[in-house]
Image (cartoon, grey):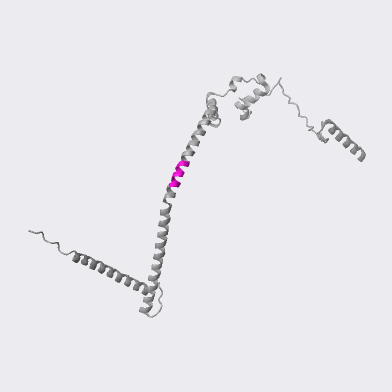
């Protein structure tokens, strides 16, 4: 029994291989082509299937114009469809033309669009180059200002540090011990010192004004 099954398999394989077409390559290798033979499309032209559009049992997709075009392309005049009804309507035609103009414009329009885009890009590039040139011209002054501000900030930080150390030293001398800068008595001492400094500055300004007034003196009288 096993021998008979093996024999049938051998016959079947040999039949399939023999039904395929073979060819030899220039190098002498055996080439085997596909053995698939498509089934012919059988159209029932005598009694084609034409769906009834007025029937509730007919699916909606079989009532569309797209399906009518498919039926006419398959059965031709046997489908009973008027070829004139397959053409797009005026609205559909305008939509198709608008889409073609948008996605597939004429060559002249494409060239004009390219020219306009290149012109716009060149204008943007020139404006950018102008801005870069103006900024490069300002660069030395900007660097000098940055360095000056950095020096001033460093000097201010140094002065603040020296003032803080001076206040701490004065607090140690006044209270006899190291005082926490966050303590109320230290803050009161700082407020008192700032108040005295404001008074001194005010008196100094007043003295300077008086000296300027005294230095100017009375204006000489006009000769009679």
Q: Quadrant of residue 176?
A: bottom left
Looking at this rendering, what residue extends furthest in the front direction?
223
- Residue 221 located left or right of residue 203: left
Looking at this rendering, what residue extends furthest in the bottom direction?
176
Query: Within the magenta stretch, is there residue 127?
Result: yes
Above or below, 9 against 71 in this view is below
Above or below, 136 against 9 in this view is below
Quadrant in the picture for the N terminus? top right
213 or 140, which lies in front?
140
- Residue 42 located left or right of residue 196: right
Above or below, 132 against 17 in this view is below
Q: Residue at x 38, y 76 (%)?
A: 169
Q: Residue at x 42, y 57 (%)?
A: 146
Q: Residue at x 92, y 39 (%)?
A: 3
Quadrant in the picture for the C terminus? bottom left
Query: Within the magenta stretch, is there residue 50?
Result: no
Q: Quadrant of residue 33?
A: top right
Residue extent of the magenta highlight: 125-133
Residue 200 placement (x, y as % from top left): 28, 70
Residue 163 placement (x, y as % from top left): 37, 70
Residue 50 is at least partly visible in this image: no
203 or 181, which lies in front?
203
């Amino acid at each position: 029994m096993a021998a008979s099954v093996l024999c049938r398999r051998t016959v079947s394989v040999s039949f399939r291989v023999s039904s395929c077409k073979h060819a030899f390559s220039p190098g002498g290798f055996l080439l085997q082509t596909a053995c698939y033979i498509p089934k012919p499309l059988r159209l029932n032209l005598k009694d084609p299937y034409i769906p009834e559009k007025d029937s509730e049992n007919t699916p909606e997709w079989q009532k569309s114009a797209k399906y009518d075009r498919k039926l006419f392309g398959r059965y031709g005049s046997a489908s009973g469809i008027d070829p004139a009804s397959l053409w797009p309507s005026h609205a559909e035609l305008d939509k198709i033309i608008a889409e073609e103009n948008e996605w597939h414009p004429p060559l002249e329009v494409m060239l004009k669009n390219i020219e306009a885009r290149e012109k716009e890009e060149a204008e943007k590039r020139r404006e950018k180059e102008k801005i870069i040139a103006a900024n490069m011209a300002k660069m030395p002054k900007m660097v000098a200002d940055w360095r000056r501000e950095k020096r001033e900030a460093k000097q201010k930080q140094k002065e603040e540090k020296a003032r803080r150390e001076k206040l701490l030293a004065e607090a140690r001398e006044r209270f006899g011990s190291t005082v926490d800068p966050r303590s109320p008595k230290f803050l009161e001492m700082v407020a008192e010192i700032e108040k005295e400094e404001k008074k001194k500055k005010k008196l100094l300004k007043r003295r300077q004004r008086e000296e300027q007034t005294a230095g100017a003196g009375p204006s000489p009288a006009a000769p009679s």
